[in-house]
Image (cartoon, rainbow, N blue to C red):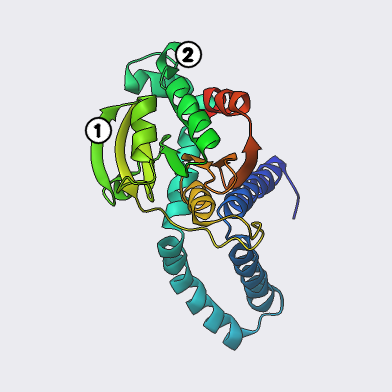
Amino acid sequence: MSFGIKDAIDIIVVATLMFYIYRLMKESGTINIFFGILAFFVAWVVMSEILDMRLIGTIMDMFMNIGLIIIVIIFQDQIKRFLVELGSHKRWSFINRVFRHHSATTDNGKKWILPVVYACMNMSKSKTGALIVIQQRMLLDDYEHSGDIIDANINTRLIENIFFKNSPLHDGAMIIAGEKIVSAGCILPVSHDTNLPRNLGLRHRSALGIAQATDAIAIVVSEETGNISMAYKGALHLKLSNTTLENKLSELCE
């Protein structure tokens, strides 16, 4: 059997797909499950195809058939995020512009960033805890409806009032979408990443949790230290300066 160009392309495509799945699982904190599934798949190939063990091969075939459905159910958020990232790749940006009927985002469409940065700066000085989530391409409807709908223009003073210690909404997360404050007091998924420093509280874990489950950007202001942090694509960036926060938002927000 000869090895041709099709075989080489086949291997490259599979390797690329596995790399993207690995990266997605690593960002979402489920990398151990990925290795477990990969080990089971390798064992299935060895038992069924190489060693030709019919009984164990048949049992593993049944697990594979059922397992695909279970995997889709368990990793529906990760699969959704993978498809969103695939569709939002820069190479397809011209298609997005055709369907959205507008040109690429410019700095003029990011005037809301400065009020957010100023609010974080003021809350950092007063050590007011805050958790702000900025929607990207993946919709956050389920999380928005877990809090109180606000639907207001982004304003520094409004953000500070929402997270004021005596405010009924200060414990939850604020969600920004479409250059508006959509809702506040929202409940987010909590990350169970064991690598997080123990001194980080629920706000940081919730920020990382939403960054692992979606493509959203989460900003945290620590109530204990006043430090500003950002979670994005399953990574938590700690102790950001005001300038760094502004630059990252300008770079990452679409």
Residue type at mark 1 is: Asp
- Could you tell whether 109 is left or right of 82 in the image? left
Q: Nearer the viewer, residue 84 or 43?
A: 84
Q: Residue 236: where, in percent of width, then height?
A: 61, 45
Label disc, if present, on residue 141 of the rendered structure: none
The structure residue drawn at horizontal position 54% and vertical position 28%, both measured from the top left corner, is: 252
Q: Residue 182: where, in percent of width, then height?
A: 29, 36
Which residue was labeled with disc 1?
151
Residue type at mark 2 is: Asp
Secondary structure of the residue carrying tag 1 is: strand
Q: Residue furthest toward the right?
A: 2
Which residue was labeled with disc 2?
107
- Residue 50 lies, with reference to residue 154, above or below; the image says below
Locate residue 176: give its quadrant: top left
* Residues marked 2 and 1 touching at CB (< 8 Å): no
Secondary structure of the residue carrying tag 2 is: helix
Locate residue 144: give its quadrant: top left
Q: Residue 180: where, in percent of width, then height?
A: 32, 28
